[in-house]
């Protein structure tokens, strides 16, 4: 499949040399290299990057604290000021080295500083490689409202090197596989089966599987860059998943995003099975994956109404009906309109019964 993204993706064994060759062709020439990382990627990933790229000489390294709370306007002001202090100009190049938080923030920094600097996304988490760094969305949280401010801005290039995954905590690895499973679940059965092998530790080439996820997401983004229609297929698992994530966060039991997404995928699969013709066998496959690899989400039936309340909030809109991508068989989802909240309640009860029969 050809690369549907409007920028190169360097992902093979030679990715760092390819990046160097690409930058040498750039005009005007890069004046200075900035590297944005968080505390963890500064420790684990920066040495790998610098070892692979001896041509990066005297970079300005900007290190931020890790964690979602730092994806904030307050930190962005500090980043703008740091760029000013280092006298960044329009020929400066920003390398975003980190998980989705760093690539979201760094993308926004590059989109806004001096009205736009070139930047390269170098995701280091699985979620970043397979999802967050793909598709040109950048953003910040405002208070508790996630991704309230942002832009659609393409990087100059994307580099995907699975070597970074060697130091990624297992929980973060599992969280990333959830988004990859989602890509397969809605759009590509073979990919779904490949991610199942990745979870089992039997996949021969995880790097190729990540690139396949990138291609699936990129093809959707290409057909709907500003998310007016088909891109919503990537929201699979997120209608219920976001509600579970918000509820968990506000009750003091925060969850890795992917854990909520996987639970959301299964809940939405219950709806697809009961009301939209999802095949029994396909539901079973997903259910077994969830049981085998992901911890159950901790909530009681008495909390379901509180979870449902979160489903009415999306950014500033109050939602009365939902467009949910539901497959009839794995790899083949269509957007369905659900106007009856009772379907979600049914799904959450069925999910609870799976773990507390
Ligand atoms: N822009 C988009 O389209 C898009 C899509 C999906 C998610 N996102 C955003 O992505 C963010 C989540 O991304 P994430 O899950 O990568 O979170 P993250 O950036 O917080 O990374 C997860 C954790 O792993 C650490 N880490 C990352 N790479 C590491 C490595 N190689 N070795 C050791 N530790 C490492 C990080 O420091 C962090 O503690 C959210 O803010 C979400 O909104 C954006
Ligand atoms: Zn997600």
Image (spheres, rainbow, N blue to C red):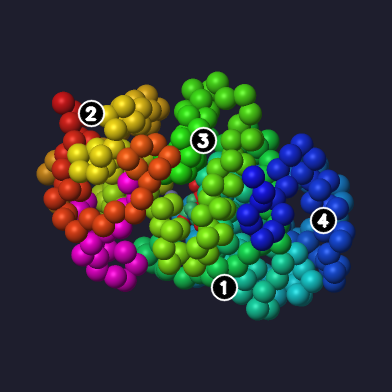
Secondary structure under tag 1 reads: helix
* Residue depicted at 41% across the width and 53% down the height: 233
Q: Is mark 4 within 8 Å of ligand 1?
A: no
Q: Which residue is mark 1?
A: 77
Front residue of this view, candidates 301 and 186: 186
Quarter of the image containing the N terminus? top right
- Which residue is at the front of the view, 350 or 3? 3
Precedes in sequence: disc 4 or disc 2: 4
Q: Which residue is mark 3?
A: 191
* Left or right, 239 with reference to 299: right
Crowding at dot 3, Cα within 10 Å, few <14 / some 14-19 / many 20+, comes out as: many
* Tags 3 and 2 touching, CB below 8 Å: no
Q: Are marks 3 and 1 in contact (CB under 8 Å)?
A: no
Q: Which residue is mark 4?
A: 22
- Tag 2 residue: 355
- What distance separates the C-alpha of mark 4 from that of mark 1? 31 Å
């Amino acid at each position: 499949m050809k690369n549907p993204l409007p920028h190169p993706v360097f992902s093979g064994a030679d990715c760092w040399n390819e990046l160097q060759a690409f930058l040498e062709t750039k005009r005007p020439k890069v004046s200075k290299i900035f590297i944005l990382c968080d505390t963890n990627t500064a420790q684990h990933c920066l040495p790998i990057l610098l070892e692979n790229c001896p041509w990066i000489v005297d970079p300005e390294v900007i290190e931020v604290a890790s964690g979602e709370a730092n994806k904030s306007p307050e930190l962005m002001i500090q980043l703008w000021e740091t760029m000013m202090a280092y006298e960044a100009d329009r020929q400066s190049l920003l390398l975003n080295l980190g998980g989705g938080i760093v690539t979201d923030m760094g993308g926004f920094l590059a989109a806004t500083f001096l009205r736009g600097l070139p930047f390269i996304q170098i995701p280091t988490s699985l979620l970043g490689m397979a999802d967050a760094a793909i598709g040109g969305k950048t953003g910040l949280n405002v208070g508790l409202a996630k991704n309230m401010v942002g832009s659609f801005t393409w990087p100059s290039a994307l580099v995907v090197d699975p070597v970074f995954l060697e130091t990624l905590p297992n929980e973060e690895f599992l969280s990333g596989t959830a988004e990859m499973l989602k890509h397969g679940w809605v759009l590509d059965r073979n990919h779904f089966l490949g991610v199942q092998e990745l979870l089992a530790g039997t996949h021969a080439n995880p790097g190729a599987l990540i690139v396949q996820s990138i291609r699936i997401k990129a093809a959707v983004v290409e057909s709907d860059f500003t998310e007016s229609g088909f891109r919503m297929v990537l929201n699979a698992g997120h209608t219920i998943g976001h509600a579970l994530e918000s509820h968990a966060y506000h009750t003091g039991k925060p969850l890795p995003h992917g854990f909520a997404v996987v639970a959301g995928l299964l809940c939405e699969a219950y709806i697809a099975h009961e009301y939209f013709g999802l095949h029994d066998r396909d539901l079973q496959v997903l259910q077994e994956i969830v049981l085998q690899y992901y911890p159950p989400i901790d909530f009681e039936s008495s909390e379901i109404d509180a979870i449902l309340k979160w489903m009415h909030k999306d950014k500033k809109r109050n939602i009365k009906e939902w467009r949910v991508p539901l497959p009839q068989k794995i790899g083949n989802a269509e957007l369905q309109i659900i106007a009856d909240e009772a379907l979600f309640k049914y799904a959450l009860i069925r999910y609870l019964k799976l773990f507390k029969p």
